[in-house]
């Protein structure tokens, strides 16, 4: 089975790459293909500015000190979500497009690239849709689908790539559960039960099925004759991997034994015992982190200059960007006590770990230390493996 992932120009390359990495991290018969440089564009004729909320209704509903943003649910009721008031002008608008427009984009990509009819084309898009759904398949061509990549932060505290990758698997499974779109409509779970087929008319209910990453027995019975055991297991393994990653990132798995930290042959950082979560750092951040791993006793920021050559040697092995003199300038900035470069990198390293596994676990892995104090990584070096 092949799944072709495409994106519009508004979806960031980092998010798209994370989604692909998550889906490809588990081996199996489902093949995920992508072209990060091939983007789909929505023209002015494709989208419209739909009014979300008028100021009078907004002021009537919520007092000034609690001004918030609003989305429209499929039931046309107003669903409020907290956001700072000062960022808005009225009336509030958002760009939306029709489902037919989205699926026409999928068909155009399919025809242009000679993709067979039995292979998936799934478009990741930042543009909202008129039905305000997270994701859907095309009724006329169910191997086409879309996933709305925005607004996830309103519903679940984790990297956007986790629920987006989950929705990719959900669409693949849903295509094979039902004979046609009509059967799908009457077979989905209106009341959420923590199954991949929960409809989630109220978007906030999606957190339940993301946390369970399950397929109920009735839905599983529908799959057994449509997909091979290997394909089903591969999909379930990916879903479970995503579930574990989301639980860690939400601080819901804290009373656990610490994971090893592995830096592989490609200098990628993984926590294999925490669902093999990857900690993504830029080369300069990664070089600074490697330096601190190599010095369990710690290094004060004012003493980084004593390790300039060591840091430079690490960095040149990690990065192929820029000329050697440019790399030296970047290292000079990090070790320069009068600049804030090293503190900024340490802050970004901390953010990457906290975002991935939550603060309680992350504090064992990131660089820390008060102002003027020695900074270090507390992790037992027996848990560190550098290949």
Image (cartoon, grey):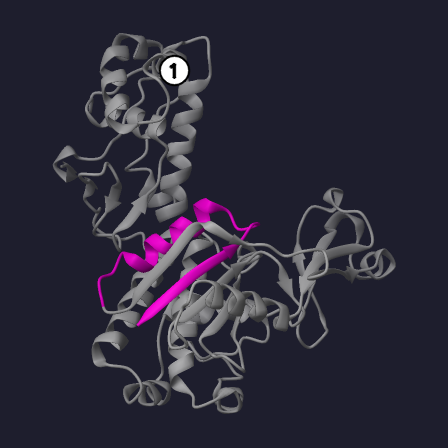
Position above or below: 118 against 314: below
Residue at the spot of label 1: 326
Q: Secondary structure at mark 1?
A: helix
Q: How far across and down, in percent of the image, does residue 347 sit?
A: 42, 29
Magenta region includes residue 26: yes
In the rendered picture of this protein, how many numbered marks are placed on residues?
Answer: 1
- The magenta span reads 1-28
Q: How far across and down, in percent of the image, does residue 85 sit?
A: 74, 46
- The quadrant the C terminus occupies is top left
Q: Please, which residue is most extreme toward the right here? A: 56
Q: How far across and down, in percent of the image, does residue 191 sit?
A: 52, 83
What residue sits 19% from the left and 40% below the top? 264
Q: Is residue 252 visible?
A: no
Q: Could you say which is closer to the camera, residue 345 or residue 365?
A: 345
What residue sits 27% from the left and 77% below the top? 232
Position above or below: 164 against 196: above
Q: Label 1 neighbourhood size at 10 Å, few (<14), some (14-19), many (20+)?
A: few
User: Is 78 positioned to the left or the right of 1 in the image?
Assistant: right
Q: Could you say which is closer to the camera, residue 233 or residue 204?
A: 233
- The quadrant the N terminus occupies is bottom left
């Amino acid at each position: 089975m092949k799944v072709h992932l495409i994106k519009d120009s508004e979806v960031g390359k980092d998010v798209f790459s994370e989604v692909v990495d998550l889906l490809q991290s588990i081996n199996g018969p489902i093949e995920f293909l992508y072209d990060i440089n091939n983007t789909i564009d929505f023209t002015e004729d494709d989208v419209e500015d739909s009014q979300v909320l008028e100021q009078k209704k907004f002021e009537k509903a919520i007092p000034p000190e609690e001004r918030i943003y609003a989305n429209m649910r499929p039931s046309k009721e107003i669903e409020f979500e907290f956001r700072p008031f000062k960022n808005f002008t009225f009336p509030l608008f958002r760009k939306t497009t029709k489902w037919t427009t989205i699926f026409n984009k999928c068909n155009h990509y399919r025809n242009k690239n000679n993709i067979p009819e039995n292979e998936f084309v799934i478009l990741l898009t930042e543009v909202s849709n008129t039905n305000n759904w997270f994701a859907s398949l095309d009724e006329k061509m169910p191997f086409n689908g879309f996933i709305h990549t925005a607004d996830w932060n309103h519903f679940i505290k984790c990297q956007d790539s986790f629920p987006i990758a989950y929705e990719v698997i959900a669409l693949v499974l849903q295509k094979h559960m039902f004979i046609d779109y009509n059967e799908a409509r009457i077979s989905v779970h209106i009341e959420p039960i923590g199954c991949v087929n929960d409809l989630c008319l109220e978007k906030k209910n999606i957190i339940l099925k993301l946390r369970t990453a399950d397929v109920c027995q009735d839905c599983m019975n529908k799959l057994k004759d449509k997909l091979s055991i290997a394909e089903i297991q591969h999909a379930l393994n990916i879903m479970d991997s995503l579930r574990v990653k989301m639980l860690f990132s939400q601080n819901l798995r804290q009373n656990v034994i610490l994971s090893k930290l592995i830096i592989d042959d490609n200098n990628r950082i993984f926590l294999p015992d925490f669902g093999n979560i990857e900690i993504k750092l830029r080369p300069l951040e990664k070089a600074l982190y490697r330096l601190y791993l190599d010095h369990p006793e710690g290094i004060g920021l004012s003493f980084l200059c004593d390790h300039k050559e060591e840091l430079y040697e690490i960095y040149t092995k990690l990065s192929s960007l820029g000329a050697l003199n440019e790399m030296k300038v970047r290292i000079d900035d990090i070790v320069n006590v009068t600049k804030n470069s090293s503190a900024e990198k340490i802050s970004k390293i901390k953010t990457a770990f906290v975002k991935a596994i939550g603060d309680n676990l992350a504090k064992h892995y990131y660089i820390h230390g008060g102002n003027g104090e020695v900074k270090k990584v507390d992790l037992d070096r027996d848990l560190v493996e550098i290949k």
